[in-house]
């Protein structure tokens, strides 16, 4: 799962390229060329070409389900084996990070529940339950609030 670093930490870097926004393009946005493992940005205000090599690149037509199946589900399996897992999304404003997380969280909860059920059947343990609650932004709470509760 990703690069093995000297300190034993596996880091996996992927990119999700969001669909083109015509308004951004008219303000001098970059031209983007993607392949399964590389993004090349060219043009823009600076005219400089920049390349990024990654484990995988998801194009504009990819879904949260694609990202979950290829990257998140293997992390859940590792999590249940005792490996610490962190999923971090970062990028410029208006690049659909919140939308991606809103799609990934229910898939992750469902996947975790399924893996816990499979594991409990093997161990003969009680049935685990995972509950997911999401509160969308409002005037009083400008950020999403997520709560995942797991009973084993």
Image (cartoon, helix red, strand yellow):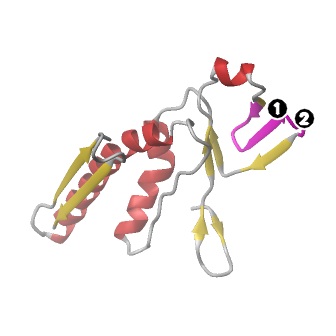
What percent of the width, then of the height, locates residue 134?
Answer: 25, 46
User: In the rendering, which numbered label is found on residue 123?
Assistant: none
Corner quadrant of residue 106: top left
**How many C-alpha atoms fall within 10 Å of the one at disc 1: few (<14), some, or many (≥20)?**
some
How far is disc 1 from disc 2 in space, using C-alphas? 5 Å
What percent of the width, then of the height, locates residue 144?
Answer: 34, 47
Vertical position of residue 147 compared to residue 68: above or below: below
Vertical position of residue 32 compared to residue 54: above or below: above
Vertical position of residue 5 compared to residue 39: above or below: below
Check if mark 1's residue and mark 2's residue have beta carbons within 8 Å: yes
Q: Quadrant of the C terminus?
A: bottom left
Q: Which SS class for mark 2?
A: loop
Residue in the image at 47% along x and 64% along y = 86
36 displayed left or right of 139? right
Residue bounds of the magenta highlight: 32-48
Which residue is situated farthest in the bottom direction here?
Answer: 7
Q: Which residue is disc 1 drawn over? A: 44
Q: Which residue is disc 2 drawn over? A: 47
What percent of the width, then of the height, locates residue 29?
Answer: 75, 29
Confirm whether the magenta stretch covers residue 60. no
**How many C-alpha atoms fall within 10 Å of the one at disc 2: few (<14), some, or many (≥20)?**
few
Confirm whether the magenta stretch covers residue 43. yes
Q: Quadrant of the N terminus?
A: bottom right
Residue in the image at 67% along x and 74% along y = 5
Which residue is situated farthest in the front direction here?
Answer: 140
Q: Which SS class for mark 1?
A: loop
Number of disc labels: 2
């Amino acid at each position: 799962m990703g690069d093995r670093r000297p300190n034993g930490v596996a880091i996996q870097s992927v990119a999700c390229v969001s669909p083109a926004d015509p308004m951004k393009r008219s303000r001098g946005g970059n031209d983007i060329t993607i392949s399964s493992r590389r993004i090349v940005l060219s043009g823009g205000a600076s005219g400089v070409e920049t390349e990024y090599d990654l484990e995988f690149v998801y194009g504009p037509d990819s879904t949260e389900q694609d990202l979950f199946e290829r990257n998140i589900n293997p992390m859940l399996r590792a999590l249940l084996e005792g490996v610490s897992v962190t999923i971090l999304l970062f990028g410029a404003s208006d690049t659909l990070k919140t939308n991606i997380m809103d799609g990934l969280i229910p898939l992750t909860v469902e996947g975790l529940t399924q893996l816990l059920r499979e594991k409990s059947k093997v161990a003969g343990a009680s049935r685990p339950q995972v509950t997911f609650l999401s509160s969308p932004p409002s005037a009083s709470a400008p950020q999403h609030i997520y709560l995942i509760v797991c009973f084993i």
